[in-house]
Amino acid sequence: YFPTFLLLFQMLFPSDGSVAFMAALLFHVLAANNKYVASAFRYTRTVGGMCRIRITPIAKHSAATFRRTAAATAAAARELSSTIANKDPEQTNNPPLFWTTDKVRSTFNEYFIQHPRYPHTFVPSSPVAPLNDPTLLFTNAGMNQFKPIFLGQVDPSSPLASLKRAVNSQKCIRAGGKHNDLEDVGRDTYHHTFFEMLGTWSFGDYFKKEAIDMAWDILTNVYNLPKDRLYATYFKGDEAQGLEPDLEAKQYWLQYLPEHHVIGCGAKDNFWEMGDTGPCGPCSEIHFDRIGGRDASQYVNADDPNVLEIWNIVFIQYNRDETSKLSTLPSQHIDTGMGLERLASILQGKMSNYDVDIFQPFFEKIFEASSEGKQYEGRLGEEDKDLKDTAFRAIADHVRTLSFAIADGAVPDNVGRGYVLRRILRRAARYGQQILGLENGFFASLVPAVVETFGDAYPELRKHQSRILEIVAEEEQAFSTMLDRGIKYFTELQSNLETSGGSVVRGQDVFFLYDTMGFPLDLTQQMAAEAGLSLDTDGFATEMEAQKQRSRNARYGSNSGDDAIPRLELIAEQTAWLSSQNIAMTDDAAKYLWDVDTEASVKAVYSVDGNFFEEGSFAVEGDVVGLILDKSSFYAEAGGQDADTGSIVIINNDEIENFFEVKTVQSFGGFLVHTGIITKGKIGVGSTIRCRVDYKRRRDIAPNHTMTHVLNAALRSILGDGIEQRGSFCNEDKLRFDFTYKKAMSLEQLRETEEFVRRVIASKETVSSEVLPLADAKAIDGVRAVFGEMYPDPVRVVTVGDDISIEFCGGTHISNSADAEAFALVEESAVAKGIRRISGVTKDAARYAIAEGYRFTDLVSSLESHNSVNGVMIAEDLDKRAGALRKELDSAYISASLKAELRARIEALQKIGAEAKKVRLQQRTDKCLNNVREQIQSASANGQNFLVVNTDISGDTKASQRIMNVVKELAPTMAFMGISEEDPGSGGKLICYAIVPDSMVADGFRADEWVQAALASCGGRGGGKANNAQGQAKECRDVKSVLSEGNAYAKKLLQYIKLSTFL
């Protein structure tokens, strides 16, 4: 058959005789063995320089199989021919790599930045952990930081407001939530939890034609991808949604590609939506055929690893409302995204993302850490039954994820994104330790390789390398311990099931391993299979959904209570409508004024159903609406400061005719929405109103905000400049500040921080503000800005004193630090690993905390003065009194440093009291033992064979054991029961203990039944053995009845035994 095969391949490749010959030869060898290739030929070069061709045989002949086989064979032949032409295989072990991943990234950015007709603005990647966006676990797409533009909510003073075109490479994580690739990572060649997304955007500028033209140009003329291997998709329409096919995009693609390379696809693949509501539109994907020399259109969007999507161009042209109705957006946008790792794999001639240059340093480090010298071989599926290569891929991916996330401020934790990061780290640690046999600590050792590989492109990795290492190492050690505990837990489950005859591990147990122990589901499945057990996956799914709901509730918070009202939000459709009605953005310059009524006009009334009231119609009493005004003196929620509240009124002849209670204020695209409820009259478009801010409340918020700035300065002064703000919040009740610090603040640090703020208040420092161009503001020496925050240009700069604190801030502040009146730092706690939270209060709340501090100081001092520390004159109830005071102190609202100091003093008193109590108990026990000896001797002399005694040992079980030992020694044939109150005469806890000699047990007298009978009168319970038992009652007001019941039970039973023996 060889001549036939040769003729076939010469026809397929008339201009390349060597490829045709090699392909025919390979095909001949396969055919001779009755095996065919299913597009899985792959040429690889191992570390040792050996060549390998991997084939996947299939059993049956078919036309489709033959075509795929021929194409795959040709691809392998082409690579082999190229290799043979190099003569010496060793010369190509490490050939110079032209398209490094760094070069692929920089080329993309430079192309669009320098585009002659449509130059793009380079916008640096936003943090991969969006600390200021609670709706996102992680940044999962390049468009996340541009959401305000798409939604029409961008602040007009923000740099985003003037942005027309943008380009960057965005750091992304897809793990958890809607976009979750975690469980797929390692099992194939292209899924990642961390990846880089090359992206371009047009905001109301160019549209479909230009986006397609530029995509084609850079792919084919810059990256030089073969045109015959490229395929494009377009949206083929959706009758159910009333959407026409995107024939416009199709025609643009037909300028570059033949008809069979332009493929229509449905909404699942080619209609992009931001969420259930909001901006959306058709999209066009670009796919690349790794093999070539064939028509691969049937494999587009068919999950074929050799025909992969590399770029998605989204045409954002619609908005979907709550009823799923689509309307055309006033401004149409472009949002494109191309996976950097995928593009690099193509340009580097690799069949797997994990074969590109950026992953090799990680594989080398894993190889070095392996005592068995295990190397990465790129195996998949059935070939990777031992999961070795799966482990390599998962570990390499996951160490990137953890490094970038921690560098951007996220940390492993038990909730939210921290929980996801902890799962990722434990998954990697488990693969390393269980599959590759690596030592604990191997994962942390990979962090320097991440920093070295990506540090030039992302300097934050170098800046935070030590912190990344510390956190990863600590988490890895914790999981190693937990892994041992988890295996022990599963072994106990297995043992219990074997005992009960069960074979299914309950869903709640599987979830406990998953959620608490950090065990991936596949590990539990593997352990169960090895034990011959199955899992209750339905029960596990139920537990998982419950956990997700708890997470959602925690993420979004609750809107409950008597004053709860619906949250009103404007998106692109609404802000565009306002603009189309020539309604200007709200002038809120008056928000910095105090004690004024601002006259304004109602420009729009927004309802809870997402519609605007028509002119001439009115919102009436009881309606919850949002008012958009031409100007406002209300401060809208922003920058960690709560919104102003107050009222909007219409006054006629000095009488309030209409009253609108303002509950909250938010800004969307420069339009302030005053959300609240009409409590009197009616309000409509055109109404002339007065804004009445609750300035009394604002006077409580403003000092809290200003002292947040001072607190920031205090922490930097005391803990060092290395701390970074990770969030803040202030309202009328308190101020809260989150910052990076790896351990709890000491008592001295807390005291110094509090004193720093108090000194600033006492020194009556001027608080000033000015608006400066952003560049000038950034140049101010000592200015502070929040990590990851985007500031407007120009920006407002708030200064306390000459240079105590200088920060970018748009909030409302006091004019002098003395207006804060007082300050107390009331709490310091951990938010997450490496993140601390400190809370404080000002004015009346601070004075109350200070006064409470004095009161508790006096209480502790009084307790100390009445109890000598040398053991003399120590109150008998000192430990109780100190314990009660400690409990009261723990819930007290006082300075955190003072609370820590007083707690230490109380603990010292508790220790003294406990030692004194121990001495007194020893004395009491010795006295009691002497009393018991006397009673035993008397009972023995009188011929008694049992004894029930009230023992004065304060319910101490150790003392009770000493008494029973004495009884056994002095009267080994006597049954004995002891009763003891913890606090004699209080009617509280009581213990009961008993011993019965073996001779009596043989006759049927059991100690456990004796104790149960004695305690029955006071509701107590007991247990133990036949010859030794104990029990207790939580309350017992009649000790005599217990003694009486104990005596009666023993006397009656022994009489019965004696009678039975006689008979």
Image (tube, grey):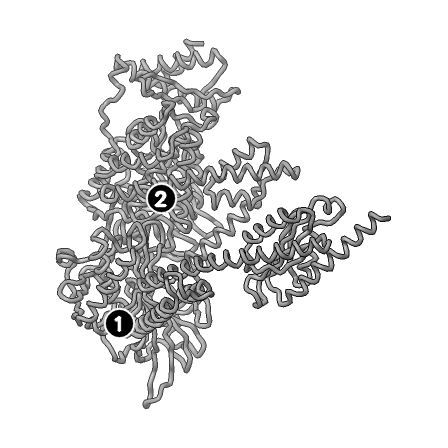
Circle 1 residues within 10 Å: few <14, some 14–19, many ≥20: many
Residue displayed at 30% across by 53% down: 146
The residue type indicated by label 2 comes to: Ile
Total label count?
2
- The percent coordinates of residue 887 (x first, y second) are 43, 64
Q: CA distance from mark 2 to mark 1?
A: 44 Å
Near-viewer residue (914 or 204): 914
- The percent coordinates of residue 300 (x first, y second) are 41, 34
Residue displayed at 17% across by 70% down: 763
* Label 2 vs 1, first from the N-terminus: 2
508 left or right of 778?
right
- The percent coordinates of residue 59 (x first, y second) are 52, 20
Circle 2 residues within 10 Å: few <14, some 14–19, many ≥20: many
Does any portion of residue 227 appear in the rendered image?
A: no
Label 2 sits on a secondary structure element that is strand
Residue 854 disc label = none
Does any portion of residue 864 appear in the rendered image?
A: yes
- The percent coordinates of residue 575 (x first, y second) are 32, 63
Q: Which residue is mark 1?
A: 822
- The image shows residue 108, relative to residue 226, as above or below, that is below
The residue type indicated by label 1 comes to: Ala
Q: Which residue is mark 2?
A: 173
- The image shows residue 90, relative to residue 451, as above or below, that is above
Quarter of the image with the N terminus is top left
